[in-house]
């Protein structure tokens, strides 16, 4: 099964767990408005006026004040009119990360961060033939119980053909209310299968892991994080505790194609690998700088490699930058996406919300990576030909293979240093490896 590049998100977000409140500044006060639609529009206007950080520095408050008068002079007959006006208003900011979410979009955002959804428990994708296929069923889900397998082609959903259907539409059809039924028609190696499934609450894990064996016989912990949600930190903590019970020599942390998520989650995860040093600092529009540091509570001190690529963004870049700048491990892969901006999410009275850019973040060395990304220590391209989903994180994965090679170097070097006897005169023999390479102490 070959799938298209999963890095196809137009917009990527870094959302702190806490929602921002609205503080009215500079004597700008909300008007008494004639209907609820205008009240929602005005609240969005005030959120922007008070807290928006313009990455380009072009935000003109005088123009924004004139815009308020214009939009509130109109009549709005229904929520859709008001929502369209809000979108048009936010579009003038030229910030792709500040945007309006209608109630359904906001609900989806909360689901994504919570790690829980109601559905049948299948991960889907569009393959190279533009067919809708099952990537994998989620463990313990109705899909598993119904015998759905990877590479099954989805022909129809509740008698609606999937030909030409995009992922978003398919997800919308598959999800629904708990304890309701859904009919899927599948094709497996030319055999048509009818599946009737009952939707239920699915817990989606954002962290997966396995133990790989190197050619040298080392046991290596491979950990993949696909997003930074509310439960990601706890998931990783449990995995690290279990892996540390084994004779793990080092770790490969895979953040490729991870678009980000919760700011707090990225901080908590960084602290599980880093004992001391700065994790990240954030800078608001008023120049207020908040520095977040490690707390000496890391769960492992073993050698670490982080895999990154063009799809590693936002929270992924916070973790990558913290590990690189603190010299806790090496980055292997391709330059990251370059999203160094922080958004907050403000719920509105009608169930909608607005995401707003409120700060920029800097790596521990004070580097602003917005639009530039983070360069890896070892640059390696992904396989020229697509690999199978199950081959990610194996030696068939070119970037993983390079990461494992770097990790073995670090493990061997640490092993040699631990064996070093300062009273010995034969220093060169201590630093020779099996392939006769001599490593520097620097």
Image (cartoon, rainbow, N blue to C red):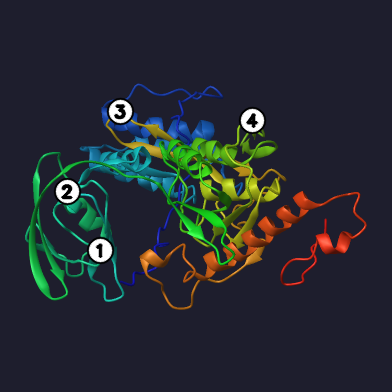
Question: Given contact means CB atoms under 8 Å apart, are the residues at marks 4 and 3 in contact?
Answer: no
Question: Given contact means CB atoms under 8 Å apart, are the residues at marks 2 and 3 in contact?
Answer: no
- Depth check, front residue: 394 or 211: 211
- Residue 365: x and y in percent read 72, 45
Q: Earlier in the sequence, mark 4 or mark 3?
A: 4
- Indicate the quadrant where residue 291 lies: top right
Q: Earlier in the sequence, mark 1 or mark 3?
A: 1
3D distance between C-alphas at marks 1 and 2: 14 Å
Relative to 322, say whether 168 is above or below: below
Point out which mark residue 295 bears. 4
Task: Name the element at disc 2.
Answer: helix
Task: Name the element at disc 3.
Answer: loop
3D distance between C-alphas at marks 1 and 3: 42 Å
- Residue 208: x and y in percent read 41, 50
To which residue does mark 3 refer? 349
Tell us which disc is closer to us: 1 or 3: 1
Q: Earlier in the sequence, mark 2 or mark 4?
A: 2
- Depth check, front residue: 3 or 158: 3
3D distance between C-alphas at marks 1 and 4: 42 Å
Q: Is the residue marked by circle 3 packed among few (<14), some (14-19), or many (20+) residues within 10 Å?
A: few
Q: Is the residue marked by circle 1 packed among few (<14), some (14-19), or many (20+) residues within 10 Å?
A: some
Relative to 277, say whether 312 is above or below: below
3D distance between C-alphas at marks 2 and 4: 41 Å
Question: Given contact means CB atoms under 8 Å apart, are the residues at marks 1 and 4 in contact?
Answer: no
- Indicate the quadrant where residue 82 lies: top left
- Indicate the quadrant where residue 217 lies: bottom right
To which residue does mark 1 refer? 150
Residue drawn at point x = 40 percent, y = 37 percent: 231
3D distance between C-alphas at marks 2 and 3: 35 Å
Residue drawn at point x = 21 percent, y = 51 percent: 172
The quadrant in which the N terminus is found is bottom left
To which residue does mark 2 refer? 142
């Amino acid at each position: 099964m070959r799938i298209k590049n999963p890095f196809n998100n137009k917009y990527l977000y870094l959302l702190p767990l806490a929602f921002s409140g609205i503080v009215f500044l500079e004597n700008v006060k909300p008007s008494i408005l004639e209907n609820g639609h205008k009240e929602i529009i005005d609240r969005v206007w005030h959120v922007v006026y008070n807290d928006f950080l313009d990455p380009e520095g072009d935000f003109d408050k005088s123009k924004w004040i004139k815009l308020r008068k214009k939009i509130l002079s109109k009549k709005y007959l229904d929520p859709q009119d008001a929502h369209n006006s809000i979108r048009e208003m936010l579009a003038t900011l030229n910030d792709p990360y500040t945007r309006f979410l209608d109630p359904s979009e906001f609900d989806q955002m909360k689901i994504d961060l919570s790690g829980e959804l109601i559905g049948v428990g299948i991960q889907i994708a569009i393959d190279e033939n533009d067919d809708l296929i099952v990537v994998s069923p989620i463990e313990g889900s109705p899909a598993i119980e119904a015998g759905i397998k990877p590479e099954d082609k989805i022909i129809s959903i509740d008698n609606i053909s999937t030909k030409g259907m995009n992922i978003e539409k398919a997800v919308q059809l598959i999800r629904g209310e708990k304890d309701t039924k859904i009919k899927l028609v599948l094709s497996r190696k030319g055999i048509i299968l009818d599946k009737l499934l009952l939707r239920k609450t699915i817990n989606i894990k954002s962290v997966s892991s396995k133990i790989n064996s190197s050619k040298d016989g080392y046991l290596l912990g491979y950990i993949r994080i696909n997003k930074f949600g509310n439960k990601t930190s706890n998931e990783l903590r449990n995995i690290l505790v279990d892996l540390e019970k084994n004779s793990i020599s080092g770790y490969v942390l895979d953040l490729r194609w991870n678009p980000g998520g919760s700011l707090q989650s990225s901080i908590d995860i960084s602290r599980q690998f880093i004992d001391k040093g700065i994790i990240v600092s954030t800078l608001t529009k008023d120049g207020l700088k908040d520095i977040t540091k490690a707390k000496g509570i890391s769960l492992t001190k073993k050698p670490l490699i982080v895999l990154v690529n063009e799809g590693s963004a936002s929270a992924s870049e916070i973790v990558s930058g913290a590990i690189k700048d603190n010299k806790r491990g090496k980055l292997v892969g391709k330059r990251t996406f370059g999203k160094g901006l922080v958004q907050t999410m403000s719920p509105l009275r009608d169930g909608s919300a607005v995401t707003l850019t409120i700060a920029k973040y800097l790596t521990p060395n004070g580097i602003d990576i917005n639009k530039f990304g983070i360069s890896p220590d070892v640059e390696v391209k992904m396989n020229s030909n697509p690999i199978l989903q199950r081959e990610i994180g194996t030696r068939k994965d070119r970037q993983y293979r390079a990461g494992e090679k770097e990790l073995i170097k670090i493990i061997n070097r640490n092993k040699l240093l631990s064996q070093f006897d300062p009273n010995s005169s034969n220093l060169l023999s201590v630093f020779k490896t099996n392939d006769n390479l001599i490593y520097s102490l620097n």
